[in-house]
Every structure is written in structure tokens, then in C-alpha cells.
Amino acid sequence: AQKVTQAQTEISVVEKEDVTLDCVYETRDTTYYLFWYKQPPSGELVFLIRRNSFDEQNEISGRYSWNFQKSTSSFNFTITASQVVDSAVYFCALSEAGSGGYQKVTFGIGTKLQVIP
Amino acid sequence: GAVVSQHPSRVICKSGTSVKIECRSLDFQATTMFWYRQFPKKSLMLMATSNEGSKATYEQGVEKDKFLINHASLTLSTLTVTSAHPEDSSFYICSARLPQNTEAFFGQGTRLTVV
């Protein structure tokens, strides 16, 4: 069974601070995919990143960076110099590369980030 | 990226009535679509997997007769909440996966309120 844990339910930071959102996952598969999604107040899910289990390279995209560590089963997300527009709920998710033609995505409970001006 | 359109974005219906939510993949064919439900301040819970041309696969605890799923074409899946009750009020969101691709694209979601 797959499981995603986001221990931080809510985080508040002051604008321009850096913030890291934690994600720990559990899976028995050796091939799997990890995701981060952003859900602004409007409700839609915005795809941020996908990482497969064989690629442990960290990734940076603008103010966003991700740290994937298989040894600790973690896929943490850091926002540098946070902005008010970053305020949203962020979901970490896991998809195992199962058979049968589909791989369902399991979401963590989400971390609500509030960036205070 | 691929676009998934969900309609309506908001719907209010009376108890006892049925409401249909559509999920369309606009620029790709999706043999598989997923339906999720999100309770307030909760995560997204997978309700069912919709397979084109066959019956949907429901997750444990989801009532098949309550939440009817039809995946009639490669670009359209519908979720019908039958005999709606106030406890069915929730945010429903669909996703579609590109063939040969593990990335799932999500619709905008539908906020259902049953009064």
C-alpha cells in the first residue's frame, strides 16, 4: 500500500522568507512517481513537478526547489523568497507504476501555506 | 500541458435530485480518468477510476449506485450524484492521464452544494 504523509498541516511565513514543505512517502514498489500540486483558494489543482523514483537529482525551478532523498523516503519542497501569491494548499502525491493500465495517485493531506505581507 | 475541462464549476441542487458533472480531455484521448472527492480541509480521496468502454472501478466505501460514472468516449467521463443529500456536498475533481504517461492532469473541480 502507498501512503503520503505531510506532517505540517499549516505554515505561516512572512513574505520573503524561505519555507520548506515536508513530504514523506511509503511504497513497496521500486518504480514510482512523486508529485507536488498547488491548490489555490479557487480550488483547481496546479501541477508543479513530477519525479520518478530513479531520478534523485534535485530540481530548481525559479523560486521553487525540490529535494528527493530515497534513503529517507522524502520529497521536500522549498519556496525561496516567498510571496503572497504562494499562499495555497500544497499537496504531495505518489503514484506507483502498477500493472493494469492505470496508476492511481495517492495524495497527502496537504499543507496550507499562508504568506503574510 | 494537456487540458482537462470540468463542468460545472459550481452547482447547487435540492435534496433528492441528481446532478451530473462532466470531465473532458480537450486535446488528448484519455482511456482512463479518475474522480476524486475533497472534504473541507481534507485531502483528495479517490472515488473511482473510469475506464472508457467498461465499468468504473470504485474504491472501497464508495457507493456505486450513488455515484454513477460513465466513460462513454475517450474524451468524456461523467459523474452523476444520484438522489443527492446535504452530506454529498463537497468538492469533486477529475483527472485524466495521458497514455504512456504518468502525469495526471486535473480539471478545475466542481463544488457541489446540496440544500
Image: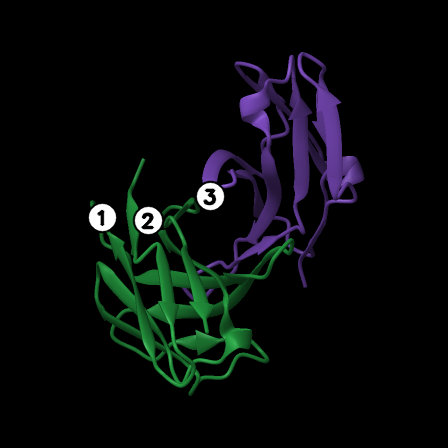
Which residue corresponds to mark 1?
B28
Name the foreground residue: A99 vs A19: A19
Kindly indicate the quadrant of the structure image that contains residue A81: top right
Q: CA distance from mark 1 to mark 2?
A: 7 Å
Earlier sequence position, callout 1 versus callout 2 = 1
Q: For this view, does A65 lie left or right of residue B6?
A: right
- The residue nearer to you, when weighing B34 against A13, is A13
Evaluate if marks 1 and 2 touch, with contact meaning CB atoms under 8 Å apart: yes
Write down the colour of chain B. green
Query: Residue B71 — which label?
Result: none
Label 2 packing within 10 angstroms: few (<14), some (14-19), many (20+): some
User: How far apart in space, not on screen, are marks 2 and 3 (Cα)?
Assistant: 17 Å
Residue A103 in the image: above or below residue A70? below
In this rendering, the answer to whether A62 lies above or below A88 is above
Task: Give the amino acid at mark 2.
Answer: Leu
Badge 3: chain ID: A
Left or right: A113, with B56 as reference point: right
